[in-house]
Amino acid sequence: MKSDDTILILEQDKNLSSCEKRIMKAIWDATEDITIQELMDTLKNRFEKDYKRTTVMTFLLRLSNKGFLFTYRKGRPAYIHPLKTEMEYMTKTMQEQIDFWFDGDTSHFLSFAAENTIKTQKEKKALQSVLRKMNPEEKPEE
């Protein structure tokens, strides 16, 4: 293995910075491949981040090195195509948090989340509905 290969593997294992997450969120939320200008407009209008083009290009290069996207030209504009889905990233990130904070025990994580984040009756009912779907043979308590 060449040292360049080692660097690429290490880059792909790194977590995303808050700016990189914001950029990926804008890309994932687009219904199709997005141009760099469209990305910059989204960052400005939705996230109130008025990055210069060179800054965005630096972040795109880092995200490309981490295996999250690639850019290509189609005519004059450059387009961005995600290589990892939002669900893949969320699953990996959530599992890392569960492993770190809850020693890999998802039930402890869910208990924590239910006790500390559910604020409304609607949220409580939604959680109960999800749990019933996971265990359809169990009858709801009355």
Image (cartoon, rainbow, N blue to C red):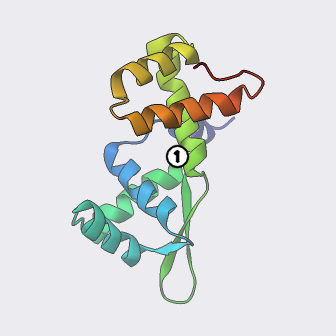
Q: In the displayed orientation, state which residue is furthest to the front.
A: 142
Q: Position of residue 22 (x, y in %)?
A: 36, 53
Q: What residue lies at 29% left-to-right and 65% top-to-bottom? A: 46
**Residue 137 sits in which quadrant?**
top right
Q: Nearer the viewer, residue 86 or 129?
A: 129
Q: What residue lies at 55% left-to-right and 58% top-to-bottom? A: 69
Q: Nearer the viewer, residue 107 or 88?
A: 107
Q: Secondary structure at mark 1?
A: loop
**The residue under label 1 is which amino acid type?**
Lys
* Quadrant position of the N terminus in the picture: top right
**Residue 121 sits in which quadrant?**
top left
* Quadrant position of the C terminus in the picture: top right
Mark 1 neighbour density, 10 Å: few (under 14) some (14–19) many (20 or more): some
Q: What residue lies at 50% left-to-right and 21% top-to-bottom? A: 110
Residue 68, above or below 54 = above
Residue 6, above or below 52 = above
Tally of numbered discs: 1
Q: What residue lies at 58% left-to-right and 84% top-to-bottom? A: 74
Residue 13 seen in the figure: no
Residue 72, above or below 139 = below
Residue 19, above or below 101 = below
Q: In the displayed orientation, state which residue is furthest to the bottom.
A: 75
Q: Position of residue 102 (x, y in %)?
A: 48, 12
Q: In the displayed orientation, state which residue is furthest to the top.
A: 103
Q: Is residue 70 left or right of residue 138?
A: left
Q: Position of residue 8 (x, y in %)?
A: 57, 42
Residue 73 seen in the figure: yes
Identify the residue under disc 1.
Answer: 66
